Image (cartoon, helix red, strand yellow):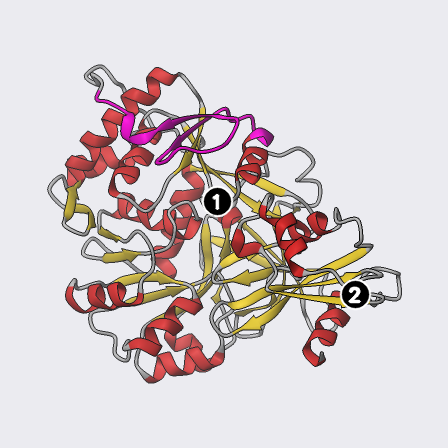
Amino acid sequence: MKHWIEERNIETPNKIAIKQGDVELTYRQLFNRAKIYASYLNQLNLKRVAFYIKNDVHHVSLIVGAWLANVEIVMVNTKLTSREIEQQLESIGVETVLTYKPLNIKQNHIIINDITSINNKNLDFHLNMDDIATIMFTSGTTGPAKAVPQTFSNHYYSAIGCKESLGYHGLTKWLSVLPIYHISGLSVLIRSLIEGFTVVLEPKFDVDRVMYLIKHEDITHISLVPQTLQWLINDELTQPYQLEKILLGGAKLSEAIINKSLEYQLPIYNSFGMTETCSQFVTASPEMLRIEPRTVGKIPSNVKLKIMNKNAEGHGEVSVLGKNVMNGYLTNGSNADTFEDGYFKTGDIGSIDDNGYVYIYDRRKDLIISGGENIYPYEIEHIILNHPEVTNCVAVPVEDEKWGQVPALVYESHKNIDSSEFKCLLDEYLAKYKHPKYFYKMTEIPRTSTGKLSRYKVKEWITHA
């Protein structure tokens, strides 16, 4: 079958596909640029290549070109350290990175701007929906990063589910400010290729710039995390303008934000999803949120959802079955407890009430969500334990007005350790946004009845410290 961009080139060749500042590309222009990159990637003769990219029109062309060339794209989080990037790429055998700037990593890297035009007349494109389109890394709460393979079919059915639960159409104008290397950012591009709407791409979130675009560019859709919505409301987003949908995800949505948004008649849609499900698969409309502010929506027709191992209150692990769900992690040993009876076990605790509303209580139990970015305690703890004076440690989330949550570290030691020592240790291994903001020393970290370090008691102690 034809690739999505080929279909767009036939059906809506002169429609604006993507706009960034003064630069606009029609679907035909995007297709032509993508073919140039496809030719180059074919010459490399590689099946899997990493992309170190940003929200940029040229990088969108590169993504589409890779798909035309049947190359699997490994999306690199540009906030990671060199060591983190190396470890992730080594785990799935990636030796080449296409990047917009030089990187201090052992893998081969090619500067995107150095890629030159190549004859592309004889290229033959074919889309196999079962092929891997992208690979993104996500972490378990108790282990290293896991590689998530996302097929074209996974992405397609995610887009169809989003169209059902959120709604978009050919006249949609979607403002994309979330990183394209995250599923929340990439999924906007994929929906546009399938449906044929226009993406307005911004390099990053900036309150003034986003407000200007909402007011003057007839933006109908935007994807945000709760913190960015709060910043917009604090600025001057007190009416919907032309906005039809504000899609929210990445962190819990507070009732205060919900109530303020509904008061301003902002069309907010709360959602729940993850990298493994190719973005959100449950979405709550404003009408649902007026009735049940805590819900993330009702189960759409394209997935099945059930709660496993329920307790007396009906709370258990949220598990999902659908064509949007990955087939399994690429990294060895990551799938043993991932699926049950075909259902993907999300690791999140939730419930479904008698009216079909879905609720999520803990976002992966120990997960710290800071500004929409996932931070896993394990990443911090196993590095801090390398300090010779630390016998035990626990990283937990604490509330933060700006970022929603930030990490705090509690450590056991016979001496007080200056935070600069920890920061020096973390600098080499972890991106800055993952560093604890607070450090606390305890003589003995409390434990559970089974002898495990108690995160719950640590959080309580910090609250009252």
Q: Nearer the viewer, residue 421 or 112?
A: 421
Image location of residue 411, percent across then percent down: 76, 61
Mark 1 or 2, which is nearer the eye? 2
**Left or right placement of residue 63 versus residue 373 in this view:** left
Image location of residue 441, percent across then percent down: 76, 66
At label 2, which amino acid type do we have?
Ser
Question: In the rendered structure, which segment of residues is drawn in magenta?
Answer: 90-117
Tell me the residue that label 1 is attached to: 323
Image quadrant occupied by the N terminus? top left
Residue found 50% across the figure and 24% down from its top: 95
Res. 292 in view = no
Image location of residue 30, percent across then percent down: 20, 36
**Left or right placement of residue 445 versus residue 10 in this view:** right
Secondary structure under tag 1 reads loop
Marks 1 and 2, Cα distance to the nearest angstrom? 37 Å
At label 1, which amino acid type do we have?
Lys
Q: Are marks 1 and 2 in contact (CB under 8 Å)?
A: no
Q: Is residue 63 above or below residue 367?
A: above
